[in-house]
Image: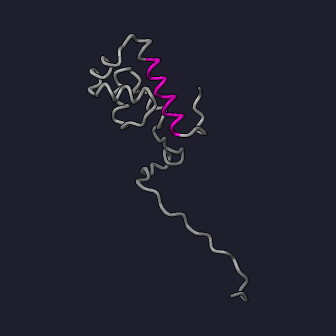
Amino acid sequence: MKITGDENNKLILTELGQRIKDIRISRSITQRELAHSAGISFSTVVRVESGEGVNIENYMKILRILDLLPNFNLLVPEQQLMPAEFIEKKPRRQRASKRKQEREWKWGDEQ
């Protein structure tokens, strides 16, 4: 199943769990071996593969053992400089600012 973003969280977690399970099995790694190598409990691996929510740190530990952690670059890409920022050598913004509210235009004789 392709994840499009329209699915609910439970469905996405179930799909991710199934993908992790498929990769683990294709590499002939047991759940116990994965748990031991990742430094997490066996029950955590079972919960991940069954689509239950777990701490993202545990996902990262599993993905590291399966050599999939670099794929996080696709999940949250690094912000690129805009061409104008590069040319003008402006520093990267450190925080977002509140958008200015546009005032409604009125004739001079309106109150």
Q: Residue at x 48, y 34 (%)?
A: 75
Q: Main secondary structure of the magenta part?
A: helix
How far from the left and from the top, in percent, is residue 98?
Answer: 50, 63
Q: Quadrant of the N terminus?
A: top right
- In the displayed structure, 52 sits above or below 24; it is below
Front position in the image: 41 or 37: 41
Q: Is residue 40 above or below residue 107?
A: above
Say if the magenta span includes residue 87: no
Q: Position of residue 100 (x, y in %)?
A: 55, 67
For image coordinates 43% across by 26% down, the residue present is 49
Q: Which residues lie in the magenta part?
A: 9-23
Color scheme of the displayed model: one colour
Residue at 35% x, 25% y is: 64
Q: Quadrant of residue 54?
A: top left
- Please count the marks in the image: 0
Q: Looking at the picture, how far across and down is residue 17, in whole percent?
A: 46, 27
Q: Is residue 14 magenta?
A: yes
Which sits in the foreground, 91 or 68? 68
Tell me what residue is drawn at x 45 percent, y 17 percent. 23
Residue 109 place in picture, x, y as percent: 73, 89
Closer to the camera in the image, 80 or 54: 54
Quadrant for residue 28, please give it.
top left
Q: Quadrant of the C terminus?
A: bottom right
